[in-house]
Amino acid sequence: MDRKEIINETNLVIRNNLHIDLSKLTKEQENYSLLHPKVGLEPRDLVAIFFELQNAFNIKFEEKDIMENRFDYYNNIIDIIEEKLRKVS
């Protein structure tokens, strides 16, 4: 799965399960934490995203993915998924 497919699938999973459309983030918003007021997600949204993406991609996030890689940034989430899928292949 390439990066574009990961982005599309991530957006689809989040939109279908959480009714949050991250595909509408501007380039500026992608550089903010998803918890930033300009984006507007709540901590509970990140927890839900965490579990939904694990299920959708059949991967397991680790503590370092959250703490070291800043799971609260959209591009970081995509990077983490991409890395985990690469390890599985």
Image (cartoon, rainbow, N blue to C red):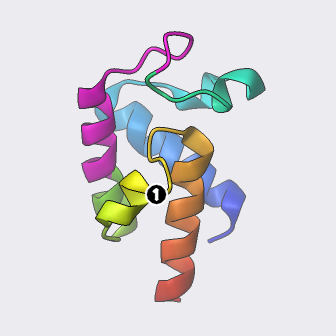
Q: Which residue is drawn at 36% across and 24% down?
A: 19
Residue 17 falls in image quadrant = top left
Q: Is mark 1 on a helix, strand or loop?
A: loop
Q: Which residue is drawn at 62% across and 71% down?
A: 1
Q: Residue at x 38, y 64 (%)?
A: 64
Residue 29 falls in image quadrant = top right
Q: Nearer the viewer, residue 74 or 55?
A: 74
Residue beneath disc 1: 68
- x, y (%) of residue 62? 31, 67
- x, y (%) of residue 6? 58, 58
Report the side of 55 relative to 28 (left or right): left
Residue 59 falls in image quadrant = bottom left
Report the side of 27 relative to 13 (left or right): right
- x, y (%) of residue 75? 62, 46
Report the side of 46 relative to 65 (left or right): left
Residue type at numbered disc 1:
Glu
Q: Which of 61 and 68 is in front in this view?
A: 68
- x, y (%) of residue 82? 58, 67
Query: Relative to residue 14, is residue 33 depicted above or below?
Result: above
In the displayed image of the protein, which residue is found farthest to the top? 37
Report the side of 76 relative to 53 (left or right): right
In the displayed image of the protein, which residue is found farthest to the front? 68
Q: Which residue is drawn at 50% across and 56% down?
A: 69
Confirm whether the magenta stretch covers residue 29.
Answer: no
Confirm whether the magenta stretch covers residue 51.
Answer: yes
Write down the region rendered in magenta.
Answer: 36-52
